[in-house]
Image: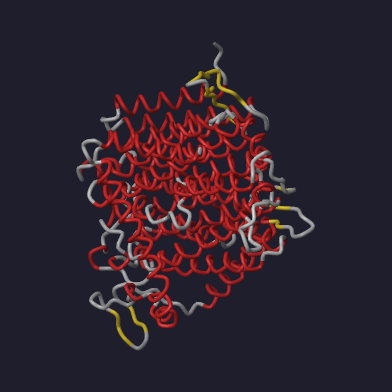
Amino acid sequence: MMLTLLDELLLFSGATLLVALFIGRGLAAGWMVTILYGGQLLALLKMAVLGYGGGTIASSLSFEIMGQELSWRFDGLSWFFALITIGSALLSSWFSCGAWERSYIRQGGNIWLFHTAMALNVFTMLILLASGDLLSLFIGWELVSWAGFLLMVLAGGVATSAAMRYITYAMAGGMAIFGGLALIYTASGSLQLEAVTTAVEQMSGAKLWLLVILFGGGFGVKMGLMPFHLWQAPAYAETPGPGSAFLGAISSRMGLFAILLVLVKLFGIVNIESLKLPFTPIDARDLLAWIAVFTIILPTFTAMKQNDARHLLAWHGIGQGGYMLLGVVVADAMGGAGGLLHVFNHATYQAALFMAVTAVIYRTGTSDLNKLGGLVVRMPLSFVVLLIGIIGLAGLPPMNGFVSKWLVYRSLLNQGMPLLFLAAVIGTLGTILSVYKLIHNIFLGQLRVEHEHVSEAPWSMMIPMLILSAIIFVTGLLPGIPLEWVASALQTVGLPVPDHTLGGIESASGSLDMIWVIGVLFAGFGVGALVFYSAGRSKRVHQLDNYAGGHFLSADVRYQYSDNFYAGLMHLIGGWYRGSFLWLERSIRSLVEFLSLGMQGLYRRANAEFYLLTTALFVIAWVVI
């Protein structure tokens, strides 16, 4: 049997897992695993240069289970998500080596289990991305769910509770997907991708609606879409630092990959758009779009209320997924490109932000925004990384987040969807407000006495952060580079591809050239700097010897009251916020906690296998009948 390029990649990833499993207890193991992630990245790049060329690379391995063939292959969509997966793992693992690793061990962390869980996540994600049929997709999906649970539960305590909530959601989502597979098998007699496409064309509207609900809900759980989002923020935030960076960058995007493969490629946007909600002008595509914008807005404004930097970022991770889904379901050239490009862009700045916050925790021992401030003079490089990251997260030039959000906005206007456009912009305004809180309360304002002797993060942590920062800026300046990868992924799922250049997009309905945009922006900065520094009237003062508002500020006077950061805004919207939004959030949370307790009670009983088998048989019988 001759090995293909896909086989080489999967073997490389499997070898990385074995190395972490068998020799992952030593301090050198982290560096070895990081080097192996680099090898996986080279194997992936080799595949792009020598392999699929816009087509498909099949694995030489395939076999049958109960008459159904399992196979694996890579195409442009798989390659794009694999690039983000392996790249995130490489830099997160690099960050974990050295100083952070030694600190984690001193605090009682199990570094062997950490490296093993990271390698297992990468391996199972590649298995999922290589799915050649719906059965192998389901197997990969479940493996990814349990691998993520292992990484989330490492910290113990609060992390264990968050991980248990996640796996409860994941099991419910898995059952929904399994029900969809049973329905498809009943209709087509096969789980092969080609057979599914043919069967969908012959299905009634009611059956197709049921499939969209089952698969959309099941995949939406992993993606953290409303109303299945409450597990994600605590689960990602409480994962050990580099693990948070990895999960925040790519883990929930496996849900978007599955949506693209099943709902967009196999079902087709045209078929989904033909499904109308009874007695309304809304179709299934509109429904997905509105789910996306509510996923943008509600978690984003929830992030504003967070006083823990990790939770603030994790809530934003949920909201940013809404932009990705929104662009994809608009399904024109700009929307699809914007949605997929945002997957890449978000991975870069989210990983950088989590790493910067982890570096702050490493030096100060806290991520509580009410206990930080003024660290810009002690950790200037970490400040720069966080600044670059929040500009990307806010969707502002010159960073890459601006390009993908601009594409989504432009597509909404081109398609005549002003309400969706307005909702997306409201989400961005909330993002800008909350990320200013993040950087202000950590790095600006007054330095606390206990942090006067804090120093910059070690270089083992700093280098991956700076690499990510460079990627964020370069792909903002030259978005044509990742747009090439996006174009291949769009062709794979049958969506139109926009005309693009090295600097951006060429279109009759609106073009974007980031080289010109950033050139003008930097020219403006240069003029401002010239005016500021030529005035010669500024005076540098120590952060503990300051003066503002007619008062001298000493170490015992806090200038920024960070626990009441949005007092003015909350005075205006507080009644609505507390009366409506919090009621809705608490209602959903109470329902989920009630279901979670029920599920935990069910699966912790001695005869859990009997109940699980009974439930599975009931679902299968309901779907088939």
Give the colour scheme shown. Answer: secondary structure
Q: Residue at x 59, y 27 (%)?
A: 47
Furthest toward the right, the residue is 508
Give the quarter of the image for residue 323.
Answer: bottom right
Q: Residue at x 74, y 60 (%)?
A: 510
Which residue occupies the foreground of this view, 524 or 416? 416
Give the quarter of the image for residue 259.
Answer: top right
Relative to 189, 559 lies left or right? left
Furthest toward the top, the residue is 1
Q: Quadrant of the N terminus?
A: top right
Q: Residue at x 37, y 53 (%)?
A: 231
Residue 490 horizontal/vertical position (percent): 66, 42
Position of residue 151 relative to residue 405, above or below, is above
Q: Residue at x 50, y 19 (%)?
A: 64
Residue 605 horizontal/vertical position (percent): 22, 40
Relative to 541, 59 lies left or right? right
Relative to 440, 325 lies left or right? right
Residue 116 horizontal/vertical position (percent): 33, 32
Position of residue 568 relative to residue 175, above or below, is below
Which residue occupies the foreground of this view, 278 or 55? 278
Which residue occupies the foreground of this view, 204 or 599? 204
Give the quarter of the image for residue 288.
Answer: bottom right
Residue 175 horizontal/vertical position (percent): 43, 41
Relative to 357, 424 lies left or right? right
